[in-house]
Amino acid sequence: MLEAMQDPELEVRPTPLKGRGVFTREPIAQGQKILTFQGRALATEALSNDLLVMQIGPELWLCSDGSLLDDCVNHSCEPNAGFLDCEPVLYALRDIEAGLLQAVGKVGGIH
């Protein structure tokens, strides 16, 4: 596994329908910080098709080549994790048992 995906509380594992996902190693309490999204900020005109992106402001995107732990966090219509403020930091929306997949709701921008 890539060094960028190392975390003592989280691990990347295969998922049946989504390829791979981020799972908890230990229980996480509601409100606890789970993960800070990383990458580099790029303007819309600098984006390329080989990047994974998340909008963080008008015409501004957090970008990665897919090698980061946060690139493996999946979407869910019933998320157990989400963004609580204007920062790309993922928090537990409810208590999460060990071994559960981390999933966020629709991310339409963090601005």
Image (tube, rainbow, N blue to C red):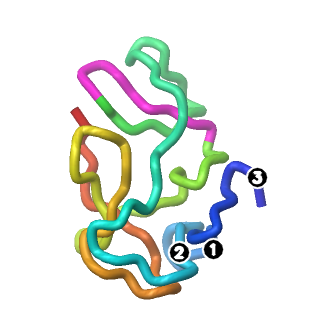
Spatial separation of the CA atoms under disc 3 and disc 1: 15 Å
Q: Residue at x 44, y 32 (%)?
A: 62
Q: Taking the image as drawn, is residue 10 in sight?
A: yes
Please provide the residue range marked out in magenta.
Answer: 57-65
Q: Position of residue 80 (x, y in %)?
A: 30, 72
Q: Taking 98 as reference, is 7 left or right?
A: right
Q: Is residue 97 above or below residue 101?
A: below
Read off the residue under disc 2: 23
Q: Taking the image as drawn, is residue 76 in sight?
A: no
14 within the magenta span: no
Q: Residues within 10 Å of mark 3 (few under 14, many from 20)?
A: few
Q: Position of residue 44 (x, y in %)?
A: 38, 18
Q: Position of residue 81 (x, y in %)?
A: 32, 66
Q: Residues within 10 Å of mark 2 (few under 14, many from 20)?
A: many
Read off the residue under disc 3: 3
Secondary structure, mark 3, is helix
User: Which of 6 and 101 lies nearest the eye of the viewer?
Assistant: 6
58 within the magenta span: yes
Secondary structure, mark 2, is strand
Q: Amino acid at mark 3?
A: Glu
Picture mark count: 3
Secondary structure, mark 1, is strand
Q: Residue at x 63, y 62 (%)?
A: 7
Disc 2 vs disc 3: Cβ atoms closer than 8 Å? no
> In the drawing, what numbered circle is on residue 13?
1
Q: Amino acid at mark 2?
A: Phe
Disc 1 vs disc 2: Cβ atoms closer than 8 Å? yes
Q: Amino acid at mark 1?
A: Arg
Q: Is residue 29 above or below residue 55?
A: below
